[in-house]
Amino acid sequence: MSHIVLLPFGTFGSLHPFIWLGRLLHERGHRVTVVSAGMYEGVVVKAGLEFESTRDTVLEEMLACPALWEEEQGPRVAYEHAGRATAGYVDAVERIIARDGVPHLLLAPMVCFGARLLREKHGIPLITVHLYPLFFMSAHAVPWMSRITHRLRRLPLWLRHFILNLGNPLDRLALRHVWRCCRAHGVPRPLSLWRQWRHSPDGALALFPDWFEPPRPDWPPQALSWDFPLEDMASDHSMEPGLERFLAAGEAPVVFTAGSGQLHAAEFFRTAAELARQCGCRAVLVIRKPDLVPAGLAESVYVTAYAPFSALLPRARALVHHGGIGTLSLAFAAGVPQMVVPMALDQMDNAERVELLGAGVWLPAAEFSVEKALPLLRRCFEEGIRSTAAALAGRFSQRRAPDELLRWIESRRVPAQVTRVVPPDATTPPVFLIPGLGADSRTFRGPWLEIPGARCVEWPEYHGEASLPAVARFVAAAWQIPDGAVLVATSFGGAVACEIARLRRVRAVVLVASSPRSEDFRTVFRMRVLTRLTSLRLTQRLMRQRSGLSRQECGRSPTPFRLALLDSVDMFSVCQADFYRAMFDALAKWPGCPLPADTPVLRIHGRRDSQVRCPAGADLELDGGHLIVMTHARECVDLIQRALPAWQAAAQHP
C-alpha cells in the first residue's frame, strides 16, 4: 500500500474530480490524504478520505472576490491567489512528512505550485492533473483564451508555437510568492511557472475524453488522456424531497446554475427567473447563497442550494450554466441541451467546445440578458440540438474501466516502499520499522520518528506469496534491507522479521507484541476461519464509510487506546484484503523461527495482550494490550534508544 496525497485548489467543481480519484485509489488499497482549504474538510472526510488543512484563508478570499468571475480580471485573481496559497500547501505536506514520512506520490493541478515545489525538494513523484484542455495550450488547436484568440488561430503553425511558448504574463502575479517559499525551503526558483512547472515530468493526466479534445502533437509525451470523472457526490447527498415532488408535479424544467464557487451571481439568477417566465417553462434554480435568490418567484420555479446533477439533469429540459467542466460533463452524460453563460477562466473555451459539438449554444456573461438569451434558450428546445446532445450521451456507455488509469498512476510512484524518517549518522545502523498485518507506517508515529536511521516500511503489493519465508524473501529485497540493520517489528511483522533474520546478518531484532514461536499467536485459527466466512472488502468499505463519523463521536480528546483503535481500523480499512487473508493461512502453517544465537533480541509486551502470549522473560512488560506499539510508544522507543549504542559497539568490536 502506498500513501498518495491529492492537492486540489479551487471551487467544489475542482475538488470533486480529486475525490473521485481518491475514492478509486482508496478502493485499490492505497492510503489517500487530501490537502486543501479547511472549508472542504467535511466533504472529504464524508467521502472516506483523510484530510489535512492548509490552515489559511486564501481560497475563501479568492472565492469572495467578485473580480474572479470577470473575463479580464478572473485569471489575474486566480493566479495571484494560487501563488499566495503555495506556502499553505507546502506546510501541510511537511506536517504529513513529519508525522507519517514522505508520501509515495502527489497529484495536483498545475496551479497548486506547492506540489511542484515539494517534488523538487523531496523527490516525490508528481502527476499534474488537468481538468480541462485550456492548460495544454496547443498550437494545433488554440483554445479560447480571450477575444484575440481568433487572430492567433489565423497565424501559421510555427508562429503559433513561438507565441504560445513565450510564457504566461500572469506568472509575475504568482512568482513572488512562489520564490519566497522556494527560498525558505532551499529549492531553486523557477524563472517561469508556465514553461517550467506547467506539466510535471512524472506524468500529466487529462481528465477529459478524446472526443472532447484529442491529444495533440505538442502535448507532453508523459500525458494520459482519460474520461470525465462525473463526480457530483451523489452517493453522499440524495435529492431533497421537495425537489423530487416538484419534478414529479409537471413537465421537465430548465435548470439554472452559476457554479459552486460563484457567490456574486444575483443578476444571473434575476435574468434566469425572467427567462423562465417569458419562455413559459418551469425552472430549478441551484443557488448556494440565500441572498442571491430573486424576489417574487412564481410557483413554477424551485430554488435549492444543492442537487446531484447526475440525478437531476436526466429529468431536465435544458441546462443554463456557467461552463464549469464538471457541470458541462454531467450535462453531456445526461444528454441534456446546454446554454453556456461563461464568465471567466476556462469557461469560455469550454463553452465554445459545447457549441462546436452541437450540444448547445453559448453567450458571454456580459451579454446575458433576456433579449439576447431568450432566442438561444428556445434553440435548445429544438430537435437538432436535442438529438445531438442525446447522441453524445451515448458515448458515456463506453467509458473505460478505471483499472488502466489506476495502473498508470501507480506506475508513477517511487519504486521503493521505504520512507526514511530520521537521517542516520555515520555510525548509526539503519532501523526498519515493520508494521503488523492489516497495518501500515501509521503504526509508528510520534516518538518512533526520533530513532536515528529509522525507516518506516509499507507492505508491498501482494504477489501470491503463500508462506512467511516467501514473504520475508520478497520484502527483504523490496525494502533493500542490508546486513547490519536493526529490525523493529510488531505482531505479524515480528514473525516476518524473524524470517528476515535468517536471510540477513541483522544487528538486532526488536519484537513488540510479537514472537518467534507460532504457538504464541493465540487467535490465528479463529481469524483464519473468520476471514474465510466474511467479505473483507465489504467490511473494509463499511469501515471507511464510518471512519470520519467514528472520530467525531470519539470527541476531540480521545484516550491513547481509543486513538490507537481508530487508527487500527483506518489502516485495516485500506489494507490488501487478499494479503490479509493469505497471511492468516500462512501463519497457521508456520512452524516458528528461532533466531540465531548471536542475534540480540529485545522482547516488549503488554500484560493484557489477548492476541500474542507474553513471555516470562520479556525485556519490558507494559500495562497495555496488543496495541502497545501505539499506546506506549515512548516506553518502547526509550528502551530501543538505550540498546542502540551497545549494538553498535558490539558490531565494531566482535
Image (spheres, helix red, strand yellow):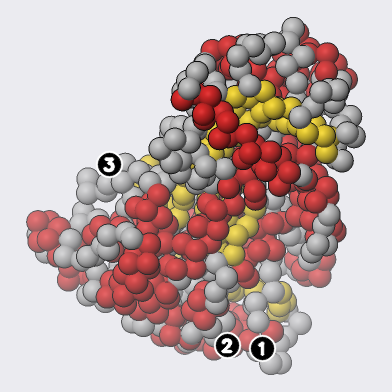
The residue that disc 2 covers is 266
Of tags 1 and 2, which is closer to the observer?
A: 1
Is residue 488 toward the left or the right of residue 328 in the image?
A: right
Out of 408 and 357, give the one closest to the viewer.
Answer: 408
Is residue 425 toward the left or the right of residue 13 in the image?
A: left
Picture layout, residue 406 above or below residue 97: above
| Circle 3 residues within 10 Å: few <14, some 14–19, many ≥20 | few
Three-letter residue code for mark 1: Asp
CA separation in Å, label 1 and label 2: 8 Å
- Looking at the rendered structure, the secondary structure element under dot 1 is helix
The residue that disc 1 covers is 291
Disc 1 and disc 3 in contact, CB within 8 angstroms: no
Is residue 245 toward the left or the right of residue 437 in the image?
A: right
Choose the circle earlier in sequence order: 1 or 2: 2
Out of 101 and 602, give the one closest to the viewer.
Answer: 602
Picture layout, residue 575 above or below residue 19: above
- Looking at the rendered structure, the secondary structure element under dot 3 is loop
Q: Position of residue 357 (x, y in %)?
A: 39, 56
Residue ID at (57%, 70%): 55
Of tags 1 and 3, which is closer to the observer?
A: 3
Q: Position of residue 33 (x, y in %)?
A: 59, 51
Picture disc at residue 221: 3
Q: Position of residue 159 (x, y in %)?
A: 9, 61
Can you tell which quarter of the image residue 258 is in?
Answer: bottom right
Residue ID at (63%, 70%): 39
Disc 1 and disc 2 in contact, CB within 8 angstroms: yes
Out of 447 and 235, give the one closest to the viewer.
Answer: 447
| Circle 2 residues within 10 Å: few <14, some 14–19, many ≥20 | some
Residue ID at (19%, 63%): 164
Choose the circle earlier in sequence order: 3 or 2: 3
Can you tell which quarter of the image residue 260 is in?
Answer: bottom right
